[in-house]
């Protein structure tokens, strides 16, 4: 739906590829679905889940053993995003470097997109 022909809407670092592949293998999943939903203090939150199969409207991005499924509602918000997996002393998790984000809450759990107000007006 919201895809530039010949270009993946998201990219993954080697660390993200390894972690997504590990989660897929552990859950015997077909992919790792990412999406967005309303919530958090900045307005939107990312969602992530292992998926048994790709939905008919999902955009599928494959990198080696990792397969990311982008949910339809998230597609316009995810263009140009780099997915990373960072491991630290206190926490580890997926990080989204998304050029469409204009604001994030202090804890980094929720975000606001540049065109979120326009999207809300249409809903």
Image (cartoon, grey):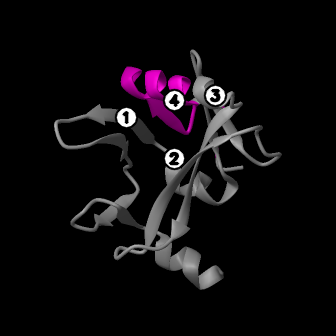
The answer to which of marks 4 and 3 sits earlier in the sequence is 3
The answer to which of marks 3 and 2 sits earlier in the sequence is 3
Q: Is residue 4 visible?
A: no
Residue 4, magenta (yes or no):
yes
Q: Which residues are magenta?
A: 3-23
Q: Residue 15 placed where, x, y %?
A: 37, 24
Q: Which residue position holds label 2? A: 79
Which element type, helix, strand or loop, lies under badge 4? helix
Q: Which residue position holds label 3? A: 6
The CA span between labels 4 and 1 is 10 Å
Identify the residue at horizontal 37%, vertical 65% (top origin): 110
107 over 95 or under it: above or below: below
Q: Residue 23 placed where, x, y %?
A: 54, 30
The CA span between labels 3 and 1 is 22 Å
Tell me the quarter of the picture where residue 112 sits. Answer: bottom left
Residue lying farthest to the bottom in this orientation: 121
Of 17 and 51, the residue lying toward us: 51
Q: Which residue position holds label 4? A: 20
């Amino acid at each position: 739906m919201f895809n530039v022909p010949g270009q993946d809407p998201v990219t993954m670092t080697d660390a993200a590829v390894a972690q997504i592949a590990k989660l897929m293998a552990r859950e015997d999943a077909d992919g790792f679905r990412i999406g967005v939903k309303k919530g958090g203090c900045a307005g939107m939150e990312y969602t992530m889940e292992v998926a048994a199969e790709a939905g008919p409207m999902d955009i599928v991005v494959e990198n080696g053993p990792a397969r990311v499924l982008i949910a339809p509602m998230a597609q316009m918000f995810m263009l140009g995003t780099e997915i990373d997996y960072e491991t630290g002393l206190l926490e580890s998790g997926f990080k989204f470097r998304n050029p469409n984000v204009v604001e994030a809450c202090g804890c980094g759990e929720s975000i606001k997109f540049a065109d979120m107000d326009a999207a809300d007006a249409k809903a």
